[in-house]
Structure formats: structure tokens, C-alpha cells
Amino acid sequence: MRLAVVCTLLSLNVLLAACDRKAPAIQTDFPLTKLTERVYVIHGPNEMPNKANQGFINNPGFVLVRKGVVVIDPGSSLQVGDMLLKKIAAVTNDPVIAVFNTHIHGDHWLGNDAIHRAHPKAVIYAHPKMMEKTQSEGANWLRLMNQLTDDAIKGTKAVTPGLGVDNDETLTLGGLHFRIYHTGIAHTDGDIMVEAVEDKVMFMGDNAVVERAARMDDGRFLGNIEACEVALKTGARHFVPGHGQTNGRGVVTAYRDWLKALYGSVKKHYVNGMSDFEMKDRVVADLGPYRKWAMFDSEVGKLISLAWLQVEQASF
């Protein structure tokens, strides 16, 4: 009996160890893009999380400061965060001293785990509303990302940001300035855009993405348009989107114009008394220049319904 019990316990321990095992490292060698002498970005695939991309779809960035590194949006998992840390180590031996999370969507911030494990003294910043939501939504994001990627983010823990930042705050980190922009409800209610002032680089989060019909479940069209306008009024020259390639002002103007076109089309047909279902074909026709954007076919119906509700709300 004792031998049987011991064998059972050993089998249970092996099973538990297997359940806790960390998923493999990111397999693809994504290139590091140097924007300025101090600012770097890794551009993830402009697609949804899946098994092939192991959940890596965003654009983690980092800024070299005096005796340290500042990270923006470390990605969707422990694995993505580890990849980012290897890229940083190829450029500098300095530690990560700070992290900014631009919003609540897990593909941007679950990589906090890797940073926290490697650099536990690094301060993680986010908008207070984003911080609050990590407490209630962190487990859901872990579950969703594992589901979408066939457990490619296994081993990741949801590490909540430690300090809140809000609109018009400027933080001095390692001798450089990081200006925070929060315009209200844009892509979500807790978005921040982060400007690396001296290098004229604006990290947009998902307030701007490139040729992607991004979901707006947590956002508002007019608020996101306002966020784009605010970013364009700054002195930034490089704009890092949440998804897609970094470039100049065109990154922001193209996404702003997409939001205006969709919302404007829905509003036009709403005024003519059409429901969201009735107007879909007409709105899609109005959006002809955007038909080839990633996720257009899968998301346009939901985006039209959401815009219809927001147009209706604005009419009261």
C-alpha cells in the first residue's frame, strides 16, 4: 500500500510539473529596428494571435537612457518578454529601469512578467484605469491568449503595473523625458500614448495601427480620432503603431482617416433611418479603399454595429 501511495504521489507531481511547464521560446528571429540613436522597436506580425506566431503580434519598443533602459509594451507573454530582453542585451548591458503599458489588451502587457523576473526593481507604469482592470481581467487575458495560441504563452503570469500615470505628465528617466498623453476613451478607456521627447518618437499603442481593421469593443470612434489628432500636434517625427510598421505622420493620419470614414458612413446612413444590419453593404461600399486591410472581413460587421450605437448615443 505504501509503495502504491508513493507511486501515485510521484505520478501526481509529474503531472503538476507538466502543467506548470513553460512553453517554448519564440521561434522566429524577428529583426530589431533602430529608429534613432536611442530608440528601438521589434515589429510583430500584423495579424491575430495564433499558434504559428506564438501570440507575438505587437510592437515592443525600448529607449536607452543613462544607465538603464525604458520599455514600452513588452508584448503578450513571458516568451515575448524574454525575446525582447535578448534583443536589449544585444544592444546594452544596462538594466531595464521602467516599463510603460499603453492599454489593457493582453497582447501588449503580459510580457511584464519577463521584465519583472529579470529586473524586479523596474517600475511598471500605466493609466490607473488600465491598472485597475488588470486585477479583474488579467486571468481572462491569459486564458484567451493560451486558447488562441494552443498554449504558446504557457507559464506567463499577469503582472500588474505598479504606478499610475495620466495625461500631461512628464517623467524624467535616466536623463530623458517621457511625456504621457491620455485623451479619455479612445481605443480603450485607459490608453496612454508615450512620447520619447528628445528622440521625437511617439508610441501610439493601439490608438493607431497600420492597415488593420482593429477591434474597438472597449473604445469610441470619436475619442480615438481625438487621440490621433493630439498625437499629430506634438513634435514627434516617428510614430510607433500598436501593430504594423513604424513610420512618419502617415501612420496616424491613415488610421484617423479610416475611423472617420467608417464612423461618417454609418452616421450618414443612420440619419437616413437605416439600422446597422440594413446599412452594412452600403458602408462596406463606402469603405472600398480599406477592403484589403487585415481583419476587414471578420471585423467590419461588428465595427458598423458599434459605430451605429455610438452615433445613436451622440444623437441624444
Image (spheres, helix red, strand yellow):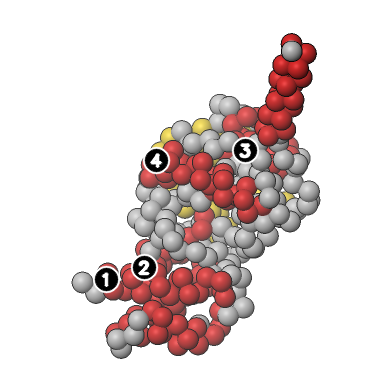
Q: Which of marks 1 and 3 is nearer the N terminus?
A: 3
Residue type pointed to by label 3 = Thr
- N-terminal of the pair, mark 2 or mark 4, is 4
Q: Which of marks 2 and 4 is in front?
A: 4
The residue nearer to you, when weighing 216 against 224, is 216
Residue 222, label in figure: 2
How far apart, in angstroms, are the residues tagged by discs 1 and 3? 41 Å
Kindly indicate the quadrant of the structure image that contains residue 243. Answer: bottom right
Mark 4 surroundings within 10 Å by alpha-carbon count, few (fewer than 14), some (14 through 19), many (20 or more): some
Q: In the rendered structure, are the residues bearing label 2 and label 1 in contact, judged by CB atoms less than 8 Å apart?
A: yes
Residue at which label 3 appears? 156
Relative to 89, is 233 on the left or the right? left
Instruction: Measure the C-alpha gap from mark 2 to mark 1.
Output: 10 Å
**Residue situated in front as seen by the camera: 74 or 55:** 55
Q: What is the CA distance from the residue labelled 3 to the residue labelled 4?
A: 19 Å
Write down the quadrant of residue 80 in the picture: top right
Name the residue that disc number 1 marks.
Answer: 314
From this viewpoint, is residue 231 visible? no
- The secondary element bearing badge 4 is classed as helix
Q: Taking 140 as reference, is 6 above or below it?
A: above
Return the residue found at the far top. Answer: 2
Give the quadrant of the N terminus.
top right
Q: What residue type is labelled 2?
A: Leu
